[in-house]
Image (cartoon, rainbow, N blue to C red):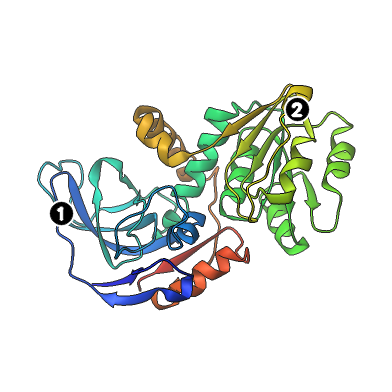
Amino acid sequence: MKAVVCREYGPPESLKVEELPDPEPKEGQVIIDVAACGVNFPDTLIIQGKYQFQPPFPFSPGGEVSGTVCKVGDGVTDLKIGDQIVTGTGWGGMAEKIAVNAATAIRVPKGLDLVQAAGSMMTYGTSHHALKDRAKLQPGETVLVMGAAGGVGIAAVDLAKAAGAKVIAAASTDEKLAVCKEYGADELINYETEDMKERIKEITGGKGVDVVYDPVGDRFAEPAVRSMAWNGRYLVVGFAAGDIPKIPLNLALLKGCSLMGVFWGRFNGEEPAASAENLAELQAMFEDGTLKPLVSKTYPFADAPQAIRDLMERRAKGKICLVTG
């Protein structure tokens, strides 16, 4: 099989497509012929040695895949050859075949193709966990989504609207904001050309926002915290803009707000029953058309370095995926 291989830490351009032996399933695993692999922010970190987890060299990046089961390991009873599934992998997904745990795989929801499925699990899983479990978002509350045109951002806009919230989408270009508007955002802020804090004050009548969903960090974080309503919840999702911000903790005191970490990967391991419930809820919302994953661009495996570079430089809208065909 062909795979995108990382043999040493470095930029995306150091990745190479190589021929590797096909994997074999262990007990409880299935092998899938990969149709598509979602490209996510952790992929940009893991190849540079900056992620929380580091696999041994050589490894392939790629944390979520969709495909068709081609081999079934011992002890697997609920999947068979020919089933189309989507699953998280942590890494290893940028390959033509991969061994995955059958217990964590779900069948591709009706209404989604394999590419959409590969572009939905991590982003919607993260955003659903953030808004439901961490923020406990209620209908009628106001949510500020930072980096709203990115993968997790669009998912957060989609989910917040489905939950009955008012959504303020913040992004760096008017083109990106137009995508957010299509996904139901009620208000738009270009935080490169507008004063975000003043715009939020104007939009909310001085009350502030109940929930901030922030996968961006850097210099945008503190103005967002200063724009929180009383009893607000600030969701720390990631730091796509670069630096990890240093928030003055007196703001949490003055606002009576909570700063909450969102780590979907660890949540899956620590609370498997709650994670399975969330995935079932997402699957139902995909199938009834409530949620509509956006995959704006696909790349062949040979262009994996360009795909990761585009994500690093925040050029992507929604999700981007690698495809094998």
Residue 301 percent across, percent down from the top left? 39, 73
* Residue that sits furthest to the left in the current view: 74
Give 239 or 186, whichever is nearer the viewer. 239
Q: Position of residue 228 (x, y in %)?
A: 76, 31
Image disc number at residue 39: none
> Residue 143, can we see it?
yes
Q: Residue at x 61, y 66 (%)?
A: 313
137 sits left or right of 231 in the view: left
Q: Quadrant of residue 150?
A: bottom right
Horizontal side, residue 147 vs residue 188: left or right: left
Locate residue 83 relative to residue 26 in the image: left or right.
right
- Label 1 secondary element: loop
Mark 1 or mark 2: whose residue is earlier in sequence: 1
Q: Helix or strand or loop: what does disc 2 sit on?
A: helix
Task: Check disc 1 and report the residue beneath it.
Answer: 25
Question: Quarter of the image containing the N terminus?
Answer: bottom left
Res. 250 mark: 2
Question: Marks 1 and 2: CB-CB under 8 Å?
Answer: no
The residue under label 2 is which amino acid type? Asn
Q: Quadrant of residue 91?
A: bottom left
